[in-house]
Amino acid sequence: MNVFNMLIPMTIEGLRITIGVFLATLVISIPLSIIVAKLRMSKNKIIAKITGIYIYIMRGTPLLLQLMFIFFGFHYIPLIGFAFGRYQAIIIAFVLNYTAYLAEIFRGGIGSIDIGQFEACQVLSLSKRFTFMKVILPQVVKNVMPSIGNEVITLVKDTSLVYILGVADILKAAKSVSNTYSTFIPYIFVGIVYLLITAILTKLLDNFESKFSYYR
């Protein structure tokens, strides 16, 4: 019983960190990823190349390494003169990482739209902004929702990586209680919490996807 007296308050506190990192990453990275996807498809070869290199680096290196580099690395880079705090480093690393992955998903979704729709909008004298926001993007979102859903679920689990910077998320809470009482129960408890979060998100994603069913 003493295990849960210690575990539950620490889990609730850690859940604030987990949800905070999760929401901040989604709210910032989804709009950014659409912009990056458009830049990646730019006819300007320099812009497309630079964007491609950014995506390659973010997808080609582990998120854990990116967290460590952004937090610790700036201490060793001359002429910068500042270093990020723990929470700043976490948000920056997560946003940069997930923006790259989501950008490739959106790029594929945009590329899947029939070019005839773009041409039809030109014939109707619709602006490029209106065409993209009101005609193309809703269809893209509908097409990529399953892939976006996978990334959202992965993000929930990836938030556990913040422990490397000494931030007390729910997994670190389980580890602390487990070390104190020499029991595996806290890990089982936290595993159930992750499953509950995933179940809620899955339901929300299913409801969101159904709103775009009229495009089928």
Image (cartoon, rainbow, N blue to C red):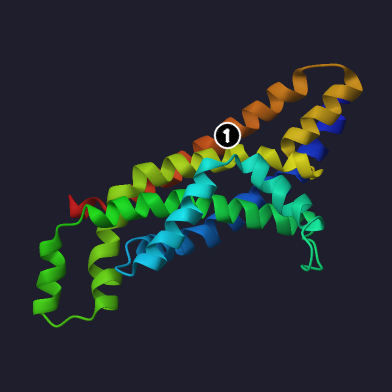
Toward which corner of the image does residue 52 lie, by quadrant? bottom left
Residue at 25% over, 77% down:
128
Residue at 85% over, 27% down:
177
Toward which corner of the image does residue 123 lie, by quadrant? bottom left
- In the rendered image, which quarter contains the N terminus? top right
Toward which corner of the image does residue 79 lie, by quadrant? bottom right
* 127 lies above or below 112: below
Mark 1 = which residue?
A: 196
Please indicate whether residue 157 sits to the left or right of residue 106 in the image: right
Q: Position of residue 71 (x, y in %)?
A: 75, 52
Nearest to the observer: residue 215 or residue 124 = 124
Residue 39 seen in render: no
Residue sitting farthest toward the top? 183
Nearest to the observer: residue 148 or residue 71 = 71
Q: Amino acid at mark 1?
A: Leu
Residue 107 seen in render: yes
Q: Secondary structure at mark 1?
A: helix
Q: Position of residue 192 (x, y in %)?
A: 63, 27
Q: Position of residue 42 (x, y in %)?
A: 33, 67
Residue at 46% over, 64% down:
31
Marks counted in the figure total 1
Neighbor class of circle 1 (other Cα within 10 Å; few <14, some 14-19, many 20+) is few
Q: Position of residue 131 (x, y in %)?
A: 23, 73
